[in-house]
Image (spheres, grey):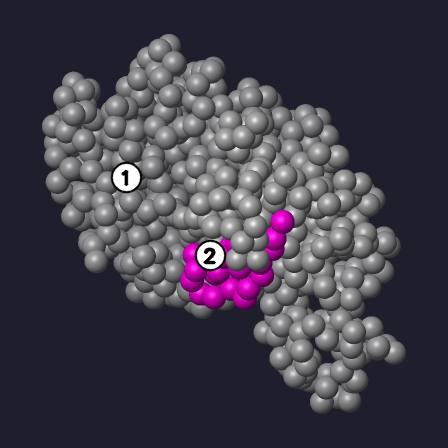
Amino acid sequence: MGKQLFRYSEENKERFLDSENITFNDGSVVTPEEIWHYLTVEAPVKYPSAFEINLYQGNRGSRDETLPTSLKTRYLGLTFSARMERAKDNGKSIAFIQGGQAVDPYTAADTIALRPGLVNQWNNGLEYGNDINKENLRRKKSKEKAFHDMSFEACQTGGYEHVQAGNLRIDVIAPYTVLRCSDVSYGVEAHRHGPNKDVKLLNVDFPLRNQADKPWAIEYFAKNLRRLVQTLDEVTGRTTTEGDLLQAIKLHNEGRRLGTELAELWWSADIPPTNSDDRASLVSLGNLETHGDVQASLSVLKEAKKFIAERVKNGVKGHAVIDNPKRLFILGSCVGINGSRSEDAGAIVVGRDDQWSHCSSLVEEEGDPYYNLAKTTLEYPYEQGIEKRAQWTIEQIKKSRADGVIFIHNWGCNTQAAISRPIVDIIKRETGIPTYIHERDLHGLRDEQEQNRVNAFIEML
Amino acid sequence: MSISGNYFAGVDVGSLAAKSVILKDGEIFATGLVPSGVNSVESGLNALNLALETAGLQKEDLTYIVGTGYGRVSAPYANKAVTEITCHAKGTNYLHPSVRTIIDMGGQDCKAIRIDQDGAVVDFAMNDKCAAGTGRFLEVMAGVFKVKLEDLGAIALSATDTVPMSSTCTVFAESETISLVARGEKPENILNGIHHSIANRIAGLFSRVGIESDVFFSGGVAKNSGMKAAIEQALKVTIVKPEIDPQLIGALGAAVIARNFSKKEGLWA
């Protein structure tokens, strides 16, 4: 029996067609008419899993039909794989990255930077016609293979299994060996096998925590950023200048400013203007990296801010958000809770710490761009010591008016597992807000065990 | 029997058993307990029907039903679903208002719950996703020693020694147990070790949420006297004696919540 698919309603088409085009890095443009056609005709056939009506899995982000940018982020997500293939066909360089950094240097060096999650997304999109079960089976299979090939379990190992297996045309592996992902970065270096085993590798060395006030650490890291750009230039054959990096910083600062303004606008609303998943997908545009295309992200972000402002002004509530939901702030790395099911249980996710940390960190535009970028990177609040990170998190929790905090981390993420307890203890001590720690099973499904704990926490609130 | 007043039911479908409690005028009127099958809807209905039959009621006589346990996600007979953590808190508070700390051990998980004077959850922690330290773990061990599950506790209490267990995984613990038997360790001493190993895991959960007197032990495993003794020793507490079958506490809490919800929704004054 076929699975029931969600379909966008024709009654919202006109409003959507009145919205703006998306402009891409290569100057190409896609119109709302083309996006609508893709989302209503092509995509449900290619990617039924994305449209499957499933109470337990998937998400309802992008099903807010009167919010055009919600549909556009969905469009960018669903076309991601095809766009990466096209980019490769056109000679674009693509880097595998990791470590929670901003992608300014990669943009400057005309290279698309993809984290493991996006690498997985690229690979997932190469196969058509899967429902949610088939899609999950596929993901589990690659994760199991990665585990056996690499002999250790950590988040997103499936991502570089695809690289090593030669499934994807990745030109360079260039992660930051930042503490939180150090085991994985070393894993990339240690376990090179398969047809793509000679892919270029650069581990960008990152001084350990609490060094942001030391000039030697900033200079050391700035040198590493220069090495990174040189390595990317060796792949592309071009020469990236300091001016290019400055331009990239300015561009990314624009995204970071807009992302921050959008988040603060959302937080200022008495009634949540979007559901959890739409909030996350729109705010995360601020880093301009989510969809592998800086300009496309920026154009949707600009428009999103306008729509959210309109909703906040008119008191419009996001799709499927209940009245007076309990507001959850999510901590940890790389993973979040199931927004839809948590909304069904009476909550809404109002923020996350992870990439928000560098979205809200602007880079100085005057002076040596390498030094400035290194300094800002070392100052990311998320990468600081426990007390400092906790204090920054408390500020975000207060700004977002969260009622409760869930720290969630992947099985195998040793750094986050180790610091979760002291971080939440500080938060609890200083705010009195209830907290909960959860370890995510690695297979990547949002299963009943996890949701049971989250729902119990929501009931407790 | 004349049908009058308001009846509220709670149905708790766990991994090993389905339980139901019907409340009338704030008092426990009937209960039902059946083994769970693979079909959680059917299991829940069986437990509910058993209680209805005992009470001489029809499902239509019930004003409100709350479903809980892992089967709650597919409980079409229920008006609302609530997690078993909240239900155990409410059920315990209903019977024992002085209790502030609950240990709940069911078929597939164990929970450390702290509650306030109204039975609201203040904090909680649960075991990891594996079955170590749960009813299923004990069921496997009963199978290894070919004894009845309900006799495990008494056997453990007859031990003269405690054999430490190194494995926390149910499957590995089973093979470790077989090795210990082959080594000549006495079954009662091994079982005592198993009970203490589980009790220590539970004590670990309480290091997160804290312990405040009085302490109550709910869930199917609470009927195991050896486990009760091991937990009392590990936590250095005395567990309050349950007024009803502790396996029914979740369903009782669900029935109490059903009563509260229906009042809130104006279904009764």
Asked whether residue A217 appears in the rendered view, the answer is no
Q: Which residues are magenta?
A: B29-52
Callout 2, which amino acid?
Leu
Residue closer to the observer: B240 or A457: B240
Question: Circle 2 is placed at which residue position?
Answer: B45
Secondary structure of the residue carrying numbered label 2: helix
For this view, does A195 lie left or right of residue B115? left
For this view, does A325 lie left or right of residue A244? right
State the residue at coordinates (43%, 60%). Answer: B42
Q: Have a look at marks 1 and 2 and say if they share a chain.
A: no
- Position in image of residue B99 (x %, y %): 78, 43
Residue closer to the observer: B148 or A443: B148
Which-is-in-front pick, marks 1 and 2? Answer: 2
Q: Is residue B36 magenta?
A: yes
Callout 1, which amino acid?
Gly
- Position in image of residue B67 (x %, y %): 51, 47
State the residue at coordinates (72%, 60%). Answer: B222
Question: Circle 1 is placed at which residue position?
Answer: A77
State the residue at coordinates (43%, 27%). Answer: A322
Q: Chain of mark 1?
A: A
Residue closer to the observer: B219 or A190: B219
Instruction: Assign the N terminus of chain A to one quadrant of the image.
Output: bottom left
